[in-house]
Image (spheres, helix red, strand yellow):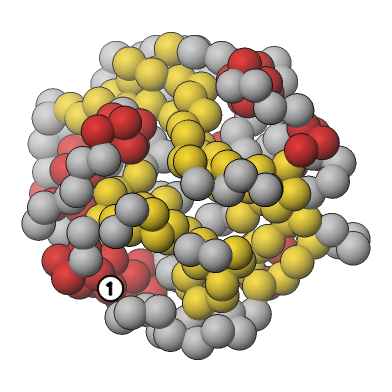
Amino acid sequence: MEIKAIRMYDHGFMNQAFAFGGEEGKDKFDEQIIYRSSLQNFLIDTGSEVILIDTGFQNGFVAPAKKLGAPLYMGESVKDYMDAFTDMGYRPEQVTKILITHKHPDHTSALQYFPNAKIYISTEDADAMKLEGENIIRVTYKDGSYHNFLKSEKIADGIYYIEAKGHTKGNSIIIVEKDELFYMIHGDVTYCDAALKANKLSIVFEDINAARETLDRVREFIKNNSTVYLSTHCPEGYENLEMKRVMKL
């Protein structure tokens, strides 16, 4: 089994008020403290299946330009999502499953490019996106608890879909067990690894109480298990993957 990063943007930034201000408020943090930003989603090659974790923007998407003082600048374009995907040697028809962490467009806009894929998504976010069709699988978390998380569903050997509400009402994370490590692909539970270490929520959430519970469970899991934390919006996401760097809290 291989996990790979599909990289779309890099060399961006976010400020501390954006990344840390969800509970105390933006004014409690310093907008001049800056963290690195990027954008990547992930791919799992099991040897028999190609499984995507989220999909990026549609081909030709133009991100907002760099602006002094912006709370978040995604970064400079590396490649369109589909160019990055095909340049890794894959074809769209090879993808059998797409596991969606949440409904936001930087995680879901390229779904239509994969004709054979079953799309796994929480009921709440599927309803919000008005997704219908035989290829839409509303996850029921039928396999019960997974470590300290209360609800999970086994997708394939070593791949688990975990309920993790808060950022959106149907937010989820994916955990992959590989080589005695746990790879946590968490969507936007945090926007940067510094926020995870500081135990801070971003300003982007639909349910603040659920987001706090999710972050608490994520941190508890990481403290008790050797976890490689794979973020979507900071370059530590692909760096941690490349180095198999275990998160320390």
Task: Give the residue at x 73% y 42%.
Answer: 95
Q: Is residue 50 visible?
A: yes
Task: Give the residue at x 43% y 57%.
Answer: 176
- Left or right of 16? Residue 169 is right
Q: Is residue 219 visible?
A: no
Q: Residue 87 lies in what quarter of the image? A: top right
In depth, the one of 2 and 236 nearer the eye is 2
How far from the left and from the top, in percent, is residue 231?
A: 36, 43
- Left or right of 243? Residue 205 is right
Q: Residue 137 lies in what quarter of the image? A: bottom right
Q: Name the residue that disc number 1 marks.
A: 217
111 is higher (above) or lower (below) than 5: below
How far from the left and from the top, in percent, is residue 159?
A: 51, 62
Mark 1 Cα-neighbour bin, 10 Å: few <14, some 14–19, many ≥20: some
Q: Residue lying furthest right in this view?
A: 133
Q: How many marks?
A: 1
Q: Which amino acid type is shown beneath numbered disc 1?
A: Arg
103 is higher (above) or lower (below) than 110: below
- Quarter of the rendering occupied by the C terminus: bottom left
SS label for mark 1: helix
Task: Give the residue at x 70% y 52%.
Answer: 97
How far from the left and from the top, in percent, is residue 47?
A: 61, 44
176 is higher (above) or lower (below) than 163: above
How far from the left and from the top, in percent, is residue 144?
A: 50, 87
